Amino acid sequence: MTKTTPSRREFLCALGGCAAAATAAGCSDLTHTSWFRSAFRELGDDEKKAIVADLEREHAVKYGKPVKVGTEGPLPDVEFGYALDISRCIGCRRCVYSCVDENNQSRDPQLHWIRVLEMDKEKGIDFAHANAYYEAEKVPRDGHFYLPVACQQCRNAPCVRACPVGATWMEKDGIVVIDYDWCIGCRCCMSACPYGARHFNYGEPHVPPEQLNPDTHYLGNRPRTKGVVEKCTFCIQRVRKGRYPACVEVCPVGARKFGNLLDPDSEVRYVLEHKRVYVLKAELNTRPKFFYFYGL
Amino acid sequence: MLAACGHEHGEARYPGVVKAALQSPGEKIEVPPPPFTEGAFPCSDCHDPSLPVNRERRKLEMAHQEIVLQHDEEHRWCLDCHSAENRDKLHLASGELVDFTESYRLCGQCHGDKHRDWRAGVHGRRIGQWNGHKSYLLCVHCHSSHAPKFEPKPPQPAPVRPEALGRGVVR
Amino acid sequence: MATLRRFWQFALASLHIVLRGNVYYWIWIAALLLLIGAGAVAYAHQLQAGLIATNMRDQVSWAFYIGNFTFLVGVAAAAVLLVIPAYVYDWKPIKEVVILGELLAIASIVMCGLFVTVDIGRPERFWHLLPGLGSLNVPQSLLAWDVLVLNGYLVLNLVIVTYMLFSLYRGRHPAKKVFLPLVLFSIPAAIAIHTVTAFLYNGLPARPFWNASILAPRFIASALCSGPAVLLILMQLLRRFTRFDIDDRAIWKVAELMAYTMFLNLFLLGAEVFKDVYSDTEHLVHMRYMFVGLGEHRAIVPYMWFSVFCSIAAFLLFLIPKTRRNPLTLNLGCVLIWIGVYLEKGMGLVIPGMTPDTLGEIYEYFPSNVELWVAAGIFAVGFLLFTLMVKVATPIMLGELHASDVQGIGHADEPAHEPVR
């Protein structure tokens, strides 16, 4: 990737010159505002550092506590994969809310990365009869099974292809990420996603400061703004440090498995080799790295 | 087979990874302490080894009345798993005594497929790091040994419907 | 330098013209400005609150704005129907109105741009789309292609129109070797903008309703109905209120061509309906949402049937020579086909494509008031722009407006005088 950043910034500074003069703010200040921020993929290390410092300062002021914005890159020889045992999931939605807490999703307007679908056993996996809004005193309900859906981290990701500005891409470790400061909010990726995995911030996202998870990643759970798209990143801020995603840890029935597809001894590889595995909408050739399996 | 193959590639690339699949069946697996009812262990505090043992299958009336066996209750009872000779241990079908920390060996006698999946980290929960140190939960951390089937749980709230999102905003 | 000075003169003269008009002109302008103001207020609210002020949600994440955008791309492409007979077949009666088609294309593309702008979440980041500055994702992203072809088409039409009018203003006929290649190039360009826009939907296997290879031809067929309908009405208005002399034969010819394209439009729709209904797969659900509704979800059903009714009625009116030559039924047909295509593209393409969503959820979308006002404002911008451009173009084409040192060239098809130097 060529580094066009400095000249681009200078150009925009020149454009914004009048405004800058009016507000008596120098160009050096302006380049730090998010409008001038370059695409993450084009940033050099020094620029990353400067931007992260700015972000951390902004968030600390807004949320009244220190917030870390990490930029950890992919680990070598790692491609992440996920396996979910649909014969075990009971539809309790613990994963949904632990994801919200871990990844700083907006509480109001509500935004969830995981959608748990209730389906009829006699109809099988059939989205036309799925219900995400089931209310029950206890789950699982008789005659039903549950299918949690989030980003399938496709190898052949239609969302990545659709983005007109290259604000979303697949990292070397297989995680499809979004640069929230580069996304223009056109929602092409949402039209392209066959799994309803991408979510748009229709209003200004709101996370109560005391509930904010301060351990964040630039491409993951750092606080977002309105008008941009977000989605599951396999908890990039955790998994790049060796931890399991939050949903894996919270699942009360142990239905969620995560690991390195390149490691023959990982849990996911065991599932792929020993269980009957299913991927959603295989006919679309998206080649997900999220597998559903029948553990029983 | 998997274990042998994995040892060569996996272990070399991910040093320090504890892998269940690599371990020989006799090797102990790292687990947190078993979830005893408070004050219940060691059992020998009450079950004095010097007293004679009543091996007859019967309804318990002096203690442990709270335990309702729902685990193949037609065929099983306490002493099929708990050792009568050493109350602080469990015993396998072979008569071998095992510690409560190794209770998975006892469960694995009947539930061999689950045991195999569990050792691979696929049945149940494993905590720790996907590329590093992992520890297992015993079967009994999730399943009650006396009534192992999961009870249904109340679900967390359903998502807000799109119609109701942003109520209060002029549209 | 002299050319620049003349161009400045031309610009001033144009400004002078748009500032003069009778009371009806000013009432029309004032009404448009009022609508623009209302749209601007609504948009300001949307900017402040976010797109939550619209009724779009994750389940239906593209809707009314993008539907209007799609419709207007079609209108913009319509100039081609005039260019083909005029220049490819060298048919005189239409030649003089080609410029109106180009002006309509300009106004439509501007509206398209505005509809996309109001639809995106971070419009201030538009520069991410600029080649060089941003990072346009070509050749992968169809929206990136759409940005390129639409802007290219806008520039092309601006160049053609400015060159033509400026030449006439200077008392020269446009030089054929400059002008003809540009006009001919606008034919594939018009087809390209509509094809690329259709591919924007077409290339999404996640949405089976759009993932049909018939989509691009359908887009073009419907564009060739709605675009000329505007022009037919406009041609009659100009004939009535200015000295513009437009041959009846030109109007009839356009109407006849429209009858064919209307048939094609209905035929392609029928082919699509047949495929879905007869195969009766799970993908039929979108078509059912459109024409019969899903349970209590029937919000767009009446609009879709009305659209079909309008399209068929207009087709019959244009098919029968007697009714297409009668001004009353001709204009009725124009209005009907406009409504028919507007409903089909504006509501019938985008919304059913997203309902139910990819996980089977039915969220019944209907545009919010904010969306309706913003859209009205954008249409007002387009109409205003078109009005002003036609106001300037008309006297120039009639030879009433020309550089002070040039004699009028009279009617466009009389030989031009070379400017005296």
Image (cartoon, coloured by chain):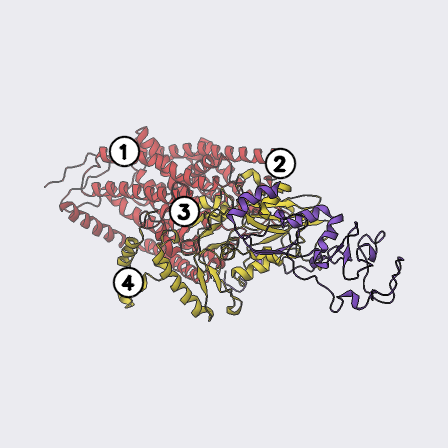
For the residue labelled by badge 1, is the local secondary structure a helix, a strand or a loop? helix
Q: What colour is chain A? A: yellow
How many neighbours does mark 3 have within 10 angstroms: few (below 14), some (14-19), or many (20 or more)? many
Tag 3 and tag 4 share a subunit: yes
Q: Secondary structure at mark 2?
A: loop
Amino acid beneath label 1: Pro
Q: CA distance from mark 3 to mark 2?
A: 35 Å
Of C376 and A65, the residue lying toward us: A65
In primary-sequence order, the first of circles 3 and 4 is: 4
Which residue is denoted by mark 2 in the rendering?
C280
Above or below for C48 versus C214: below
* Element under disc 4: helix
Q: Residues within 10 Å of mark 2 (few under 14, many from 20)?
A: few
- In percent of width and height, residue C212 lies at 51, 36
Chain B drawn colour:
purple
- Given this view, does label 1 or label 2 mark the residue nearer the observer? 2
Direction bottom: furthest residue: A64
Q: Residue furthest top?
A: C89
Q: Which residue is mark 4?
A: A27
The type of residue carrying mark 2 is: Asp
Please tell me the numbered disc located at residue A164: 3
Tell me how far mark 3 sits from mark 1, CA to CA. Answer: 31 Å
Whether residue A160 can be seen here: yes
Q: Nearer the viewer, mark 3 or mark 2?
A: 3
Q: Secondary structure at mark 3?
A: loop
Q: Is residue B29 left or right of residue C95?
A: right
| Picture coordinates of residue C190, whole percent (x, y) | 37, 38
